[in-house]
Amino acid sequence: MAADKAALPIVLLPLGTDDEALDRCLGALDAGTPAGTRIWLADDAQAGPRALAIVERWLVRTPLAADYTRRQRMVGEVAHLDEALKACGDADVAVLAPDAMPSPGWLQQLAACLARDAAIATATPWCNAGESASWPRCGEIAPLPDDPERLARAAATLPPLHPELPAAVGHAVLLRGSARRRAGGLDADSYGSWYAALVDLSLRLSGLGWRNALCETAYVARGGEGGPYEGDMDALAARWPDWHARIAGFLMNDPLRDMRERLAQHYAQVDLPQSQHDLFPRDRADRR
């Protein structure tokens, strides 16, 4: 699996108020994302002095093609993200949570997921705190992985089946630009949180015939689980009366149980000497 660096999506990172989470996120981006990848740090007047210092130092040394913008006045999470996504036009954009920690290969795997099926509008990787995309257990918040690189390598060996999710999840999601624009973007008038606005966008995309898929070959960790703002769930229920039942049924029935167990098996085996040769054919090619 090799996606052309020039064709990789834009990475959009909205900044939050947690300085330590920002530092971890930027470090993980440098370690796990190909040099030259376009990344936009979008600040809705959230970052404090220490965060600004972290960003300034990072911009000087990062191998990524990074830009930073800051609004003079806060407009709110959803409005800010919608504004940034509109500025990206039809480009595919990977939106990260402010406390996300991408694992190596995450962006290439997400890009390959979209490329495999033109009907996929959103691609969501596994996460320790990813609700329907959580691993190792569905709907539970797990500790950060001890060895994220090993976990990423294990995920990359899974068959790329890309099953359906009830909706994309906000720890990390790759949005197909053309689909997002056709669906009308984010609804900043109805929702205050990225969590709820992403669910709403996902359901509108599904209604137009697009798919919200799990990218089971990628993993992105997160410090905690995202959630709605006050009033968001009522707004979702009013527009999508069956949403709560759908997500509850998915979490209880866990249709991805076998896939989660398969990832656990691969994770246990991936660093064994014999499995190295069988699971990573690219290593063989590199040695020719």
Image (cartoon, rainbow, N blue to C red):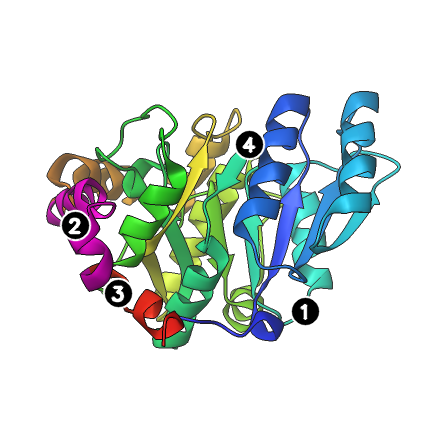
Q: Earlier in the sequence, mark 4 or mark 2?
A: 4
Residue 240 falls inside the magenta stretch: no
Q: Are marks 4 and 2 in contact (CB under 8 Å)?
A: no
Residue 276 falls inside the magenta stretch: yes
Outermost residue on the front side: it is: 288
Q: Is residue 147 left or right of residue 14?
A: left
Query: What residue appears at the point 27 percent right and 37 percent down from the top-left corner?
Result: 135
Please tell me the numbered disc located at residue 259.
2
Q: Position of residue 69 (x, y in %)?
A: 82, 46
Please tell me the numbered disc located at residue 99.
4
Q: Secondary structure at mark 4?
A: loop
> How far separated are the C-alphas under marks 1 and 3?
28 Å
Q: Position of residue 230 (x, y in %)?
A: 52, 24
Q: Earlier in the sequence, mark 2 or mark 1?
A: 1
Q: Earlier in the sequence, mark 1 or mark 4?
A: 1
Query: Looking at numbered disc 3 in the image, what kind of residue is underneath it?
Result: Pro
Q: Quadrant for residue 45, please give it.
A: top right
| Depicted 246 relative to depicted 73: above or below | below
> How far separated are the C-alphas under marks 4 and 3?
26 Å
Q: Secondary structure at mark 2?
A: helix
Q: Are marks 1 and 3 in contact (CB under 8 Å)?
A: no
Q: Earlier in the sequence, mark 1 or mark 3?
A: 1
Q: Is residue 115 left or right of residue 183?
A: left
Magenta span covers which residues? 258-278
Query: Looking at numbered disc 4 in the image, what kind of residue is underneath it?
Result: Asp
Query: Looking at numbered disc 2 in the image, what kind of residue is underneath it?
Result: Met
Quickly name the residue at label 1.
89
Which quadrant of the rendered structure holds the N terminus? bottom left
Query: Looking at numbered disc 1 in the image, what kind of residue is underneath it?
Result: Gly
Question: Would you say residue 47 is visible in this rendering?
Answer: yes
> How far separated are the C-alphas under marks 2 and 1?
34 Å
Quickly name the residue at label 3.
160
